[in-house]
Image (cartoon, helix red, strand yellow):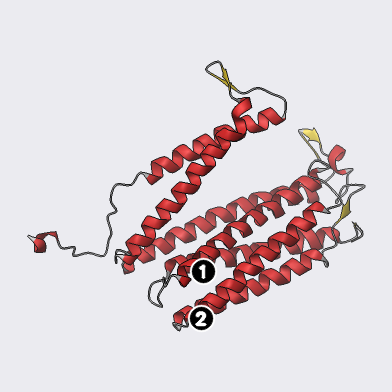
Amino acid sequence: MAGAEAKHHDYHIIDPSPWPFLASMGALVMAFGGIAWMRANAGQTFELFGVNFAGANFWIFAAGLLIVLYTMFAWWADTVKEAHEGHHTRVVSLHLRYGMIMFIASELMFFVAWFWAFFDASFYPGEDVQVARTQFTGGEWPPAGIEVIDPFHLPLYNTIILLLSGTTVTWAHHALLENDRKGLKMGLAITVALGVLFSYVQFYEYVHAPFAFKDSIYGATFFMATGFHGFHVIVGTIFLLVCLLRAMAGHFTPQQHFGFEAAAWYWHFVDVVWLFLFAFVYVWTSAGATIAAH
């Protein structure tokens, strides 16, 4: 009887899981609360079936966010458990890597959209498209009256931080392959610290920025592109922190460490995107523009 139930293939059929449905419901509640929250901030109501939800907007959003966060924790915990039980065979691990590659590719398309908006506004500042664009740019780029951030001050500092973090996460990866647990933990700890430092510097830069999101199309495209990247840095830092905690708990082996590998891929993706942001949004835009005093 036991022989009849033995598995003779490399594929893993997971048990029925509530997490896809719960994640969808959490995302729906979070979106509902977010829309109500934005409408409330604009002084508008948000009614459904005769009930005004504007007053409870934050709590609806928070409830959805908690559902999503719990689902993420529980779903990934199940995935880690499956790996420890030996279900992540060679074929399963390969498909997990394909999934991570597709996820990073989808994230890349988000940044393509932000770069598209930035270059469209910067290359054609004087064209009229549906609305008079000149009223937002003054027919020049950066828009008239805008002082830009010095790219060779805090942005350069953050570039060095991210490049160093890419080096330390690679060190941690090679240490893992050599079964050097101390090097693995040290490399991950330094990478997480550098990620936190990057976020702090970017927060400081935002607080002291000489322009605001609502001031011009330049401010809007700048904060959307760099802010979206900053969000990814925070996510990547948390991702690597979880890997550090797992490494301290004895997880990961030289033969099986997809969780760490996925985090390292994600972090390198964040590094590369920043290099493009630094080159174009900071350096290229600052050429001939008025640089704000530090």
- On-image quarter of the N terminus: bottom left
Left or right placement of residue 168 versus residue 44 in this view: left
Above or below, 181 against 12 in this view is below
How many neighbours does mark 2 have within 10 angstroms: few (below 14), some (14-19), or many (20 or more)?
some
Q: Label 1, on which residue? A: 244
Q: Where is residue 71 in the image (x, y as percent from the top left)?
A: 44, 47
Q: Position of residue 196 (x, y in %)?
A: 66, 63
Q: Where is residue 254 in the image (x, y as percent from the top left)?
A: 41, 78
Q: Which mark is residue 182?
A: 2
How many neighbours does mark 1 have within 10 angstroms: few (below 14), some (14-19), or many (20 or more)?
many
Q: Which of 159 and 115 is in front in this view?
A: 159
* Circle 1: residue type: Leu
**Could one spot residue 72 in this view of the protein?**
yes
**Could one spot residue 124 in this view of the protein?**
no
- On-image quarter of the C terminus: bottom right
State the SS at label 2.
Answer: helix
Left or right placement of residue 59 versus residue 5 in this view: right
Q: Residue 278: name its quadrant.
A: bottom right
Q: Residue 165: name its quadrant.
A: bottom right
Above or below, 94 against 225 in this view is below
Q: Nearer the viewer, residue 106 or 180?
A: 180
The residue under the point 58% across, 72% down is: 189
Q: Which of marks 1 and 2 is nearer the N terminus?
A: 2
* Circle 2: residue type: Lys
The residue under the point 45% across, 37% down is: 25
Left or right placement of residue 20 versus residue 108 in this view: left
